Image (cartoon, grey):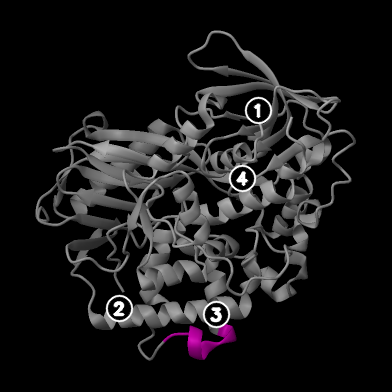
Amino acid sequence: MKLFWRFAVCLALVATLAAAAPAEPPDTAAAAAAGDTSHWGKGHGSCSKHKADYDVCVVGCGGSGAYTAVQLKKLGYRVLVLEQKERCGGHCNTVQLPGPGGYPFDMGVNVYENSSLVLQTFKDMDVQLYPASLTPPGQIFSFYVDSPKYVSFPPPTPEQLAAFATAATKWCQMYYTYFSALLTPNGAMPDFEALPAELQQVLFGSFGELLAWLAKKDPVNFGVDANGTPWYQPLYPVWLNIVNNGPGPIYELTALYALRTLSPATMDMVTKGAGWSVVGGCISLYNKFAAFLGNDVKVNAKLTATRSRGGVIKVTYRQADRSKSVRTSCRHMVVSAVQSLDNMRAIVKDLDLKEKAAFAGVTHNMYSQVIFRSAAKNVSNLAFVNVLNLSNKDLPTTVAYSQVHPAYGYALSVNLTPDDTAEAAAARMYTNLTRWSAATNGEFVLPGSIKDALLHGPELHQHTPRAKVPKDTPQLYKRLYALQGYRQMYYTGALYAYNSQKVVWTYSQWLVDNHLSRFPRC
C-alpha cells in the first residue's frame, strides 16, 4: 500500500476519545483525577489573604498553553502567558512561501479531526475551516527512498485501497479488544497497574515487539499471508507518516506512544477521508488566541526566577527586546512546556525532592521544521510530491514527512535527538536531500550550499515527551499526576496527555473545569 495523501498526516490528526472509553477518569491521575485537594495547602483560594498581580501564570503558548489561557480568561481570570519564542503556536506554524500571491504552507499541524471540541474552538475564535480530504487526490505522485534505491508509484489502485481498508479495520478491532483502556475520557494516561501484566509488558516494549506479540496471539488475523506478507503491510506508510517517531526505525518506538498516536479515530479519519484545515493556515488560530489574550501574552520572554512564598508565586522574566527584568506574581502556575528536569529547573528555582523525582524520569526529542529551495524536474504538473523513507537505518536522521511543491521546494519535518542544534538539523536534512537527489538521478535539484537552499527555518521545538526508561512509565505517571496542584503548580501538554492536539485540548479543558476554575477570581 502506498502513501497518497495531499496533506501529510502529523500528530495533530486525531482522536475522538468517546468510543470504548472508560466511564471515569483513570485512577493513575491520583490527586488530579480523583479531585483530591488536600495537598493544595490552606488559603490558596483566598483573594484577600494571598494577593497577586495575576490569578494564573501559564508557561508556554503552544497548543496546550494557549488553549488553557484562553479558557481561563473566558471565565474571568487574570492570566499571564510567557512564551520564550517569538510567537504563539508551538510547532504549529504557517509559512508564506514565495510565488505569485504567496503560498501558505502549514508546518506541523495541518489537519484537525471532525470533533465537537475542535469545531467549537475554531468557532469561538471566529477562525474559518474548510474540508480537508485525506483520500487520494488525482494529482499526487509519491516516491519512497530506501537508501540507495528509488521507486516511484502511481496513484493507488482500487485493490490497494481495499487492502488498506481491510488492514485498518483489523487494527481498530485489535485496539478495542486489547487496548481500549488507552482511550481515557479526559485524555490522561490510564491506570497502567490495573492492566494485566501481559499488556503492561507489551505497552512498554517496542512497537516491533507489539506486532510480534499480536502475530503469536492471533496468527490468523495478525500473522502473514500465503506469500509471507505481514497483515499490516498496507498500513506501514501511514504509520510512518503519522507516528513521527524520531531517530530510528518505527519498530523501535515504544508501543505505548505508537498506540496513543495510532488510535482508532486516527485510522477512521484516514479511511473516511474527513477532516478540517484552517483558512489562512493553522497559525490563524494562534494569532486569534494571542489577540484574545492581548497584552497578557509576553513573547520572547524567558523566566529567570520563580519561587513560591506564602501562597503566592513570585515570577521574574525578561523579554528579549527589554533591558530590564519584570517582576510579577500569580496565585497559580500552569506549565505547558515539556516537563523535563532541565526545563523545570529553569522554570522553578526551588524544586523539592518530590518534584525532582518526577521530572527526572522525563526525556524528549527535538522536532525541526525547515523548507529547502529545490526544483522538481518531471512533476511540474502535479500539486505535491510526498517523500518518505521506509528504511531509515542508513540515513542520517528520520524524516517524518516531506512535501514538494514544484514551484517552491521541499518542506520537511524531522525529529532529532535532544542534543541537536538548529545548525545540526539543517546539516542533516541537507545531507538527506543530497542523497535523495542522487538516489533519484537528480530528480530534485538542490542548490550547492545549505545557505542557498534554505527558504525557512530550521525551527527547533521540544517534542515527544516520554519516560526515559519505558518500564518505569507507570511509576512516572503516578508521580506526574500527583503533582497537579502541588505547591499551586499545574501541568498540561503532550507529556500529560500524549499525543494529539485534540487530546491535549481535552486534557487542558478537563484541568480547567475540575481544578483551576474552583478558585475564586480576584
Instruction: Give SS at disc 2.
Output: helix
Q: Is residue 220 magenta?
A: yes
Task: Choose mark 4 or mark 3, whichever is in front.
Answer: 3
In the image, taking residue 402 as reference, residue 83 lies left or right, namely: right
Give the CA distance from mark 3 to mark 1. 42 Å
- Say which mark, if any, is on residue 363: 4
Q: Is the magenta stretch mostly helix, strand or loop?
A: helix
Other-residue count near label 2 (Cα within 10 Å), few / some / many at <14 / 14–19 / ≥20: some
- Say which mark, if any, is on residue 161: 2
Q: Which residue is drawn at 40% across and 35% down?
A: 459
Q: Mark 1 points at which residue?
A: 346
Q: Is residue 457 magenta?
A: no
Q: Residue at x 77, y 37 (%)?
A: 520
Amino acid type at circle 1 is Ala
Give the CA distance from mark 4 to mark 1. 15 Å
Give the CA distance from mark 2 to mark 3. 20 Å
Task: Choose mark 4 or mark 2, whichever is in front.
Answer: 2
Q: Name above or below for residue 391 compared with residue 362.
A: below
Give the CA distance from mark 4 to mark 3. 29 Å
Q: Name the residue under label 3.
A: 174
Evaluate whether residue 500 shows in this view.
Answer: no
Amino acid type at circle 2 is Leu
Other-residue count near label 3 (Cα within 10 Å), few / some / many at <14 / 14–19 / ≥20: some
Instruction: Give SS at disc 4.
Output: strand
Place of residue 328 in the rendered image (x, y in percent of width and height, measured from the top left): 68, 19
Of the residues under marks 1 and 2, which one precedes in the sequence?
Answer: 2
Amino acid type at circle 4 is Thr
Other-residue count near label 1 (Cα within 10 Å), few / some / many at <14 / 14–19 / ≥20: some
The segment highlighted magenta reads: 216-224
Other-residue count near label 4 (Cα within 10 Å), few / some / many at <14 / 14–19 / ≥20: many
Q: Which residue is drawn at 30% across and 34% down?
A: 456
